[in-house]
Amino acid sequence: MEEKGTKLSRSLQTRMAMGYAVIIVALLVLLNTYPLLMSQNLMFRSQQTALQNQAVLVTNTLTTADQLTPEGVEAAIAPLEDLEVERILVTDEAGLVLYDTAEPSIAGKFALTGEVVAALEGNDHFISEYRDGTFSSRASAPVLNRNTVIGAVCLYEWDSSQGMLLEELRQNLHIISLVVIGAVLGLFLIFSRVFTRRVSVLLAGMHRVREGEYTHRVTLEGHDELTQLADQFNQLTGRLETTEAERRRFVSDASHELKTPLASIRLLTDSILQDENIDRETTREFVGDIGEAADRLIHISQELLELNRLDEGRTIHQEAVDVSGQVEKTCRMLAPLAEESRVTLETRLGQDCLVWSRPEDVNQIVRNLVENAIKYNVAEGRVSVTTRLERDRVRLEVSDTGVGIPEEDRSRIFERFYRVDKARSRAAGGTGLGLSIVRDTVQLHGGTVSVGPNEPCGTTFTVLLPAWLEEEGMA
Ligand code: ADP
């Protein structure tokens, strides 16, 4: 698992690293080319302006003559002291070199190079190239006399000082790039180690919880997404822990409930089987008790099945059910029990108390509450059942003047198998599941159930269910 976690974070890291690497490489390529190209261009342009200006200066001094001669050219150029070029070459209209400052000079020879030919054709010409740290530039211009080309002037310049500047810039950019690569790599390594460690903590926590250690919580410092993930995971684990604890308690309670009637069945059958002289009357009595224990088992399993159905949240075959009608029916059914317990049952039923449900479900709610109100009552006590339509909900109230429920137990009585007075509940045939069924049924239909004291004594249960209004049926 640990290995898997590391692999996962590695693959995440690899993807992140690739993404960053592409961005960094693109930036570095840009950094190492764009400024250099821009500077090179600027330098070319400044060379071009400088050289072409000087070419114009030279041609202007030569245009006065009708024909160019070596002596005439030398005499005209000699005063131009501030020319800052490496070489000046002047030809006549045929390309014969009349003047050349190069060592050795090619004066007296024909020079039909590209720049000379371009100038003799009447065009200004400039070309510059950068190689091995040196800018070599050539500018040429025609010498005109009355619009006739009488010669060409070519100026040559080799500049290594600007080339050095460019070279320095290139080197500095290389150093900056290396520093950036080093810093990015270092930061990435640090971040990725921290990231891997945090992800591993989270995955190790998940592994432990998966193995059933529901009390485990992941601790991650910081306020980033991973911390939020850890918080969510801890909350989820908390819920799992609660659910698991509830499940265990339920299984243990259910087994306990089933054990009691099963143990009595076992005891009674043993008594019948072991006593050979047992008389018919006693046998009948024991078999009757076995029947009662079996009834109790059937009752518990029916309630458990009912709870299971509610857990699944199935709400099929619903219809508009009149709560008042169901109360009337239930009270009629429970009248003998009330009479037997010497409890007075009274009802105050409202009109139009319709809810969207199943008659069995409403009956279930009313029966459990009214039966409890009778069971946990006192002789000469009273049970009063009220129904009322309150705007968009139906209120059902079951109040009794019975033994009451201590405040500390009120929040727990809806839990499965929870009983305040175990002995009394068992004696009355209770399973401790009735109120859980009431709560789950009410919630399934979008309602609420609450419990409070009744004045001056006893208990009041209040159920609120969404009312089914006539218009809904017509809509
Ligand atoms: P039971 O099958 O034991 O009646 P319930 O889930 O219906 O189980 O009720 C849970 C417990 O709540 C009961 O055991 C009883 O102690 C208490 N109780 C329920 N209704 C009343 C009431 N009207 N008056 C006093 N105690 C009640």
Image (cartoon, grey):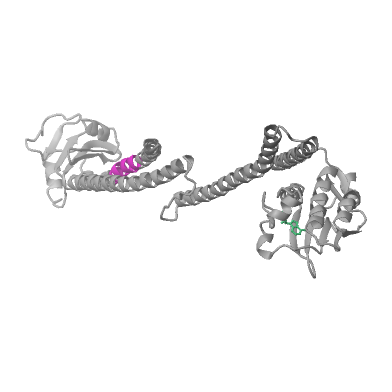
Left or right of 45 in this view: 73: left
The correct choice, above or below, for 346 with respect to 6 in the image is: below
Give the residues in magenta. Answer: 24-38
Which residue is depicted at the point 79% across and 62% down?
A: 402
Residue 22 inside the magenta-drawn segment? no
Q: Can I make out residue 214 in this image? A: yes
Residue 31 is a magenta residue: yes
- Counting from the top left corner in percent of width and height, residue 73 is at 14, 42
The quarter of the picture where the C terminus appears is: top right
Residue drawn at the location 22% of the way across and 33% of the way down: 116
The outermost residue toward the left is 104
Left or right: 395 as drawn, with respect to 238: right
Residue 371 location, x and y as percent?
81, 52
224 above or below 299? below
SS majority, magenta: helix
**Quarter of the figure with residue 142:** top left
Residue 323 appears anywhere in the view: no
> For this view, does 294 lie left or right of residue 243?
right
Residue 71: image location, x then y, percent: 11, 41
Q: Is residue 283 left or right of residue 384?
A: left
Q: Is 199 placed above or below 345 here? A: above
The N terminus lies in which quarter of the figure? top left
Using the image as rendered, state which of residue 409 and residue 326 is in the foreground: 409
Give the quarter the ligand 1 occupies. Answer: bottom right
